Image: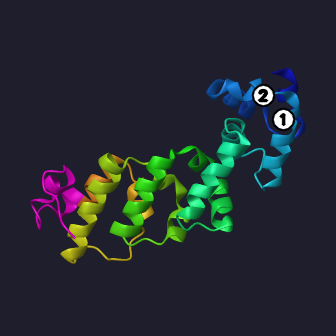
Amino acid sequence: MAPNIAVLQNHGVPNPMILKLISGQAISFILKSSRFSEMVPMVKGMGFNPVKANFIQAVRVMSGMSKLNWEGKLEVYRSLGWSEAAMFSAFKLYPNYMVISEKKIRRGMDFFVNKMNCNPSYISKYPNILALSLKKRIIPRCLVLQVLISKGLIKKDLCLATVLKLNEKEFLEKFVIKNLDRFPELLRVYQGKMELLG
């Protein structure tokens, strides 16, 4: 581990960040020093700042993937309409988007593109939403939004990603409880007891 820790220190990664990486995924340091020495400057060369948390996330992701797995995941995103620039930008925003399973990626993209009419480029700007639970978070919230839009209670052009990132309490207060007097069934919609079609 010592040579790999030295590599991070030599590239300007603060010791608290290194400790965070060790505690979060010590396996990252089990790599051969030669490979680790190539990978860290590669992440830095992508434009990641060594003092920022996403640098450590990127190192963690890349150290846990073989080149074959990396290329395979990029091919999945290409097949779903993502450009090379979009994939690179998404990795800088949320490195963990590369470790989401292919099945989850495809289900999420299918829902956003075919049910919510989102462009693939839109999803690439908010890659973290692909990590959210489709069944427990995305679909229930989108059903509530559909109801509110159809009733003219919210604007159509709201940022879907922002709504999905709200915590449970914030979402309930802002979109459900606030509108119960005008649409009492809204809570049932959110709880999955009333499904909308179309």
User: In the rendered image, is residue 32 in sight?
Assistant: yes
Q: Position of residue 120 (x, y in %)?
A: 51, 68
Local secondary structure at mark 2 = loop
User: Quick one: quadrant of the N terminus?
Assistant: top right
Color style of the picture: rainbow
Q: Amino acid at mark 1?
A: Arg
Query: Residue at point 37% right, 68% down?
Result: 114
Q: Position of residue 155 (x, y in %)?
A: 32, 77
The residue pinned by badge 2 equals 31
- Whether 37 is among the magenta residues is no
Res 174 quadrant in image: bottom left
Q: Amino acid at mark 2?
A: Leu
Kindly identify which numbered label has been placed on residue 35.
1
Query: Residue at point 64% right, 61% down?
Result: 87
Query: Residue at point 62% right, 28% down?
Result: 24
Q: Is the residue 62 above or below the residue 79 in the image?
A: above
- Whether 192 is among the magenta residues is yes
Q: Is residue 129 left or right of residue 26?
A: left
Q: Is residue 90 left or right of residue 168?
A: right
Q: Position of residue 96 (x, y in %)?
A: 59, 45
Observer-nearest residue: 35 or 22? 35
Crowding at mark 2 (Cα within 10 Å: few <14, some 14-19, many 20+): some
User: In the rendered image, is residue 53 in sight?
Assistant: no
Q: Are the residues tagged 1 and 2 within 8 Å (C-beta)?
A: yes
Q: CA distance from mark 1 to mark 2?
A: 7 Å
Q: Which residues are magenta?
A: 176-198
Q: Is the residue 61 above or below the residue 1 in the image?
A: below
